[in-house]
Image (cartoon, rainbow, N blue to C red):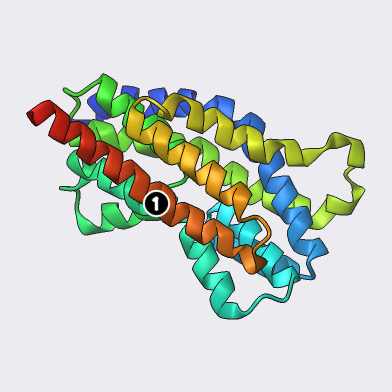
Amino acid sequence: MTDTPKLAPAFWRGFRHGLPFILVIVPFGLLFGVAGTEAGLNLAEVMGFSILVIAGASQFTAVQLMSDNAPVIMVLLTSLAVNLRMAMYSASLAPHLGTAPSWQKSLIAYFMVDQVYVMSIQDYEARPAQSRGQKMAYYAGICAVLCPQWYVSTWVGAVVGKAIPPEFALDFAVPITFLAMLAPALRSLPHVAAAGVSVGVALALAWMPSGLGLLIAAVAAMATGAQVEQWQNRKRAA
């Protein structure tokens, strides 16, 4: 109970920092609701995607591949490849939240989406003296504002999606969301190299069926980032 006053400022700081992302989360969720219903999914299936998976990019990927009648194994592998970044997010957050109880780490994993990770790691690095409780409170604050918006907007898109005028162009939310998160993250040569390789390989292999090019691009990007980081470490040690 004595820690509660210390945690509240961190929670509300996270809540405030998450508010601007509503501008892209809502149209992103609406767009998935529309895309899911247009792909033939019923309301329960669309909401199951957003509540159980809670990963917009892989949800769109899976729905697109399912619409293209791709094999189930390809749908699963491609969606997994899209979400491999979550493993890197987890490794990055481990020094800050890794000592949390198992039930808290389960919640961290469930609610980990790109916006939550990006804002959290930036806050943790800017305020290294925070306790684990304060870091958890900040994380919870961002989740509290973003995740309910994702669920609700998905439901609205699935229920009234066809009534949304085409001129609203909801698809703008997808690239803007990732550009807004990617740009601040390109802070080192390994990050830039990995991003460049992923874009180049994905475009070069766009002709491949069932999103296979995306799988290859993801692996190539991770390998490139790791190699560049190793090269930098050897150079510093020399």
Nearer the observer, 27 or 61? 61
Residue 124 appears in view: yes
Q: Secondary structure at mark 1?
A: helix
Split into 4 quadrants, where in the image is the C terminus? top left
Q: Residue at image x 24%, y 21%?
A: 127
Check the image and report above or below for 57 versus 230.
Answer: below
Residue 78 picture location, percent across and down: 54, 65
Residue at the spot of label 1 = 86
Check the image and report above or below for 34 versus 132.
Answer: below
Q: Residue at image x 29%, y 38%?
A: 228
Split into 4 quadrants, where in the image is the N terminus? top left
Q: Name the side, left or right, on which 204 lies relative to 110.
A: right
Residue 125 picture location, percent across and down: 26, 25
Nearer the observer, 65 or 173? 65
Q: Residue 27 lies in what quarter of the image?
A: top right
Nearer the observer, 35 or 69? 69
Look at label 1 and name its amino acid: Met
Residue placed furthest toward the left:
238
Q: Residue at image x 65%, y 55%?
A: 206
Residue 143 appears in view: no
Q: Residue at image x 36%, y 45%?
A: 224
Callout 1: few (<14), some (14-19), or many (20+) C-alpha neighbours within 10 Å? some
Residue 80 picture location, percent across and down: 47, 63
Residue 67 picture location, percent across and down: 75, 69
